[in-house]
Amino acid sequence: MREPGDRNWPDHEVDEFLDQIAAGGQDYRRLVERLPVIVYASELGEQGRWRYVSPQVEELLGYTAEEFKGDPGLWARLLHPDDRLRALEIESEEYLGNRNTSPIEYRMRTRSGKVVWMLDEAVLEADESGVPVWHGVLYDISERKNAEADLQRALSQQAVVAKLGERALQNGDPDSLMRAATSLIGEIDGVHSACIWEVGRDGRRLNLRAGLEDEVVGAGRRVSAARDSHAGAALDSGAATIVSEWSDEKRFTMPPVLRALGAASSLAVMIDGKDHPFGVLDVHATEPHRFSPKDVPFLQAAANVLADAFERHAADQALRHRVLHDSLTGLPNRLSFVDALGDALRRATASGSPVGILFLDLDHFKLLNDSLGHHAGDALLRAVASRLRAHLRPGDLVARFGGDEFEILIDRLADEEEALAIADRVAAAFAQPFSMEGVEHFFSASIGIAVARNSEQRTVNAELLIRDADAAMYRAKENGRARCVLFDAEMRAGALQRLEVERELRHALDRDELALHYQPVVNLRTGEVTGVEALVRWQHPARGLLDPADFVSIAEDSGLIEPIGRWVQERACRQALAWHEERPDSRPLDVAVNLSARQVAHRDLPATVAEIIARTGIDPAHLRLEITENVLVEESATAIASLETLNEIGVRLVLDDFGTGYSSLAYLNRFPFHALKIDRSFIDALGIEQERTAIVEAIIGMARALSLDVIAEGVENEVQLAELRRLGCDSAQGHLFHAAMPEAEISRLLGEGTLDYSGISPLR
Ligand code: C2E
Ligand code: MG
Ligand code: MG
């Protein structure tokens, strides 16, 4: 038995039917009533009487043929309100006798409340008594209509997903994307509204992040859904959750806000995330049964677009955070500090209030790192970071520039006095000891302060201000550390000059403006010149001959000391060899060159020296490298390794300016030194100041015990010389013998054989 509503009525059955109708046989009625259609005859008009309707009508609409026949207004009452006018339009005599009336489609409501689509194909003809009667057939076309509607819906859903995907690629912030998503989805036919819920931190509730903007009255009010709602279920199961009819819903509680909008049905899907789900996307309709499993792929696709976008945004944020922060302390790094300082300076131009920065460098940090290890160093940096934050106002910015350098930005400053007061407060952060591996250590910091006022003539930019604070910090170090120094006009002039010198120094090597002067080193027992110290000079085109004090520290800061140092070494070695060639019978002179801390800190130093030895062919035993004490304190980890290697190469290491730094003879034996050079400040006092003379005596005694040669520098008079000889000092240099002199001059003296001090008064 065929059911009414089957779509296809096979052709052969149609033919059979038509044949039988044509035959007008007994079976006419039976046939009509077997058809998968409703055949009817009804009088014209909304209230027209139904003379006949085949019984299939009951299966389709839930009302019997008898009910139709007995209730003339029933058909019109069952018309869907939206289609009613259209369907009633043809109830007019003008169609009488027109055999080509076109079929119309409309919806009807069945007894159970379901909506079905009908195709009504009829002709209006008058009966014998002239009453116009429709003779027609009603087909159930719901399936086709639904398929069409589904297709339409799928197309509009796809369009929404495509638009959303495009929107997501614009890389806006997640909030605006979420708002765009809910408004796009809310435009789909039949969808009243869409919402995005985010799982709360505690995981217990879902908080509304987008959608229902009109329903959520009172801005800032938090709207949430309970975990036992449909949204919570979607989240827990990871599967789509459909509520067909909220009024019948037993499984889930309805979020109050949905009640406010009058939701009758809903569909929710999860928005997933890489580590944990982000939340839920749901849609609501004011009609029941609006959502079916067919809608799930669409909504899930939209949710996935959102999930991807959130993921991308989170990755971007993480990357941005990494780029702008220091990973060890979590503080902003140089990049973000410069940015923030730039902003503050721009604001200051408008507001007129000064901006200050503090440049803070821990004192003796390297010593800690080397003695207690990097873990301790890292722990200290983290502890310092949190102390600094605690000692500042909430609006002040603390950044780490790397190493043991911290910068602090003080926005809206009254004056320099206030900046100094804040610096003192920051310094007070070091009043308490830091506990490292159970032991308490005290640390201090050197702080440079620079303040920018917009009244100043020069335009202050961030980099310039940082450089000023840096220079002030260096001054604090020079003045003995553990103090605050405010950058002033004099330092500014100095800083500017340094910049200028650095610029010129870059060309000094190419332009052959550097030269070496040599000072003889005299053996105090024999009076013989056993070596020379090479001292660099700069023949400045405008300023004349410059001493190392005028440019070496600039060369160190700028890194230029590396190429300059290589030049000095090579030049000195070649000169020593040239002198030896001129006097092949004399013992070769030892040649000493000075190394800066920066050169010693450089891993490549041994390789550089080895290369110069190989290139020049000098005997390494005649090359002396002079290193000052602070090198050992600041850089000992790398330095020890380099010094060991240099010692293996065979060069002699000399500890220069001994006594000016940490004066600890105790750690001398940790380094492979051949000799130490007592600083001029001790020699000055020799024979005049009892105490210093005693120190020199102790130094010489200790050096002996460690098998180190002792050299005295800055010997200017006979008294000093006598004292040194009395104390058993091995060698000396100084103006008493000869000041440092240009290459040509010392070459001449050596050639003449007049550079000799064997006439110095014999010992005792
Ligand atoms: P230094 O290595 O301690 O060199 C000794 C300094 O004392 C030299 O000054 C020398 O001219 C000076 N001097 C020598 N005898 C006397 C004396 O009797 N009385 C007085 N008052 N001074 C005396 P100079 O040449 O100005 O060098 C200063 C410093 O510059 C050197 O101290 C050294 O640390 C550095 N330096 C010189 N040349 C180089 C170089 O090629 N590379 C590096 N990195 N540093 C260098
Ligand atoms: Mg020296
Ligand atoms: Mg010296």
Image (cartoon, rainbow, N blue to C red):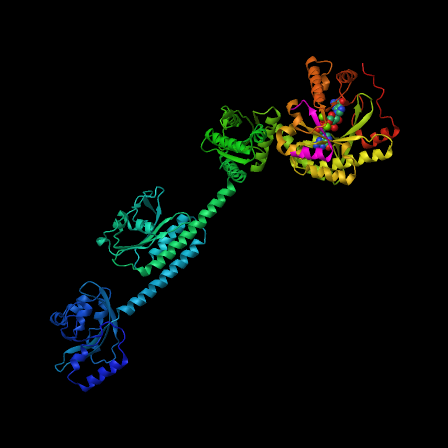
Closer to the camera, 525 or 224?
525
| Residue 107 location, quadrant | bottom left
Q: State whether residue 752 appears in this view.
A: yes
Please state if 356 lies on the left or on the right of 722 as rendered: left
Please state if 671 lies on the left or on the right of 217 as rendered: right
Name the quadrant where ligand 2 sits.
top right
Residue 86 at what x, y percent from top left? 24, 69
Q: Is residue 400 above or below residue 678?
A: below
Closer to the camera, 253 or 93?
253
| Residue 724 location, quadrant | top right
For the magenta stretch, what is the residue range? 641-661
616 in the magenta segment: no
Residue found at the very far left of the displayed protein: 70
Q: Is residue 302 above or below residue 371?
A: below
At a point 17% along the width and 65% down the height, the residue shown is 111
Please state if 596 lies on the left or on the right of 108 as rendered: right
657 in the magenta segment: yes
Please state if 540 lies on the left or on the right of 139 as rendered: right
Residue found at the very far bottom of the displayed protein: 23
Q: State whether residue 663 appears in this view.
A: no
Residue 17 at what x, y percent from top left? 22, 82
Residue 578 at what x, y percent from top left? 83, 35
Closer to the camera, 394 or 699?
699
Q: Is residue 15 above or below residue 187?
A: below
The tally of labels here is 0
Residue 143 at what x, y percent from top left? 28, 68
Q: Quadrant of the C terminus?
A: top right
Q: Quadrant of the N terminus?
A: bottom left
